[in-house]
Image (tube, grey):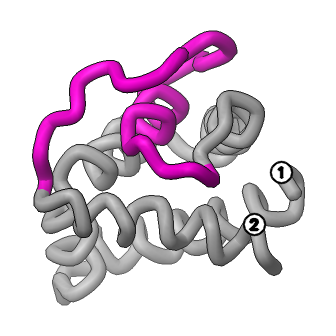
Amino acid sequence: MRKFVILSALVALTACSGGRDRGNSGSTRGATGDISRACLNADRSAATPALCSCVQQVANTQLSSRDRSLVADFFMNPEVANDTKISDTNTDDAFWARYRAFVTSADNQCS
């Protein structure tokens, strides 16, 4: 459950940075995709290379490339996550259901 909270909070905590571009603030060794790199660049203590790479691997198996790109955008612009969550379009609702399932799977596999 702790990792689930961490994974869910990574996007939310990015909002605390005020959306500033932090650049490449840490090692991306082991990063295998946009989500992993965005996770590491969020510069949060819980965002280790191992955790971020694991999350990327789960995303690779569960999300389309378009979905993965959107999830990576959440780290760079948390308003995108909020807008997507509160949107009432069928497309966004379907994405959010896939995203929640992905977060649950990542929690189970990466803890």
Percent position of residue 79, x then y: 14, 67
Percent position of residue 59, x then y: 62, 42
For the image shown, how many numbered marks are present on the structure? Answer: 2
Instruction: Identify residue type, mark 1.
Output: Cys
On-image quarter of the N terminus: bottom right
Report the front residue among 107 and 105. Answer: 107
Report the front residue among 4 and 101. Answer: 4
Give the crowd class for mark 2: few <14, some 14-19, many >=20 residues within 10 Å: some
State which quadrant residue 51 falls in: top right
Give the crowd class for mark 1: few <14, some 14-19, many >=20 residues within 10 Å: some
| In the image, residue 60 above or below residue 101 | above
Q: Is residue 45 left or right of residue 84?
A: right
Residue marked by disc 2: 3
Asked whether residue 29 is drawn in magenta, I would say yes
Residue occupying image coordinates x 60% and y 63%: 7
| In the image, residue 17 above or below residue 43 | below
The answer to whether residue 43 is seen in the rendering is: yes
Q: Is residue 64 left or right of residue 90?
A: right
Q: Secondary structure at mark 1?
A: helix
Residue occupying image coordinates x 46% and y 26%: 37
Percent position of residue 4, x then y: 71, 72
Percent position of residue 48, x then y: 66, 38
Residue occupying image coordinates x 74% and y 56%: 106
* CA separation in Å, label 1 and label 2: 7 Å
Instruction: Identify residue type, mark 2.
Output: Lys
Nearer-N-terminus badge (1/2): 2
Residue marked by disc 1: 110
Q: Is residue 21 left or right of residue 105?
A: left
Residue occupying image coordinates x 87% and y 58%: 111
Write down the region rendered in magenta: 19-46
Tags 1 and 2 in contact by the CB under 8 Å rule? yes
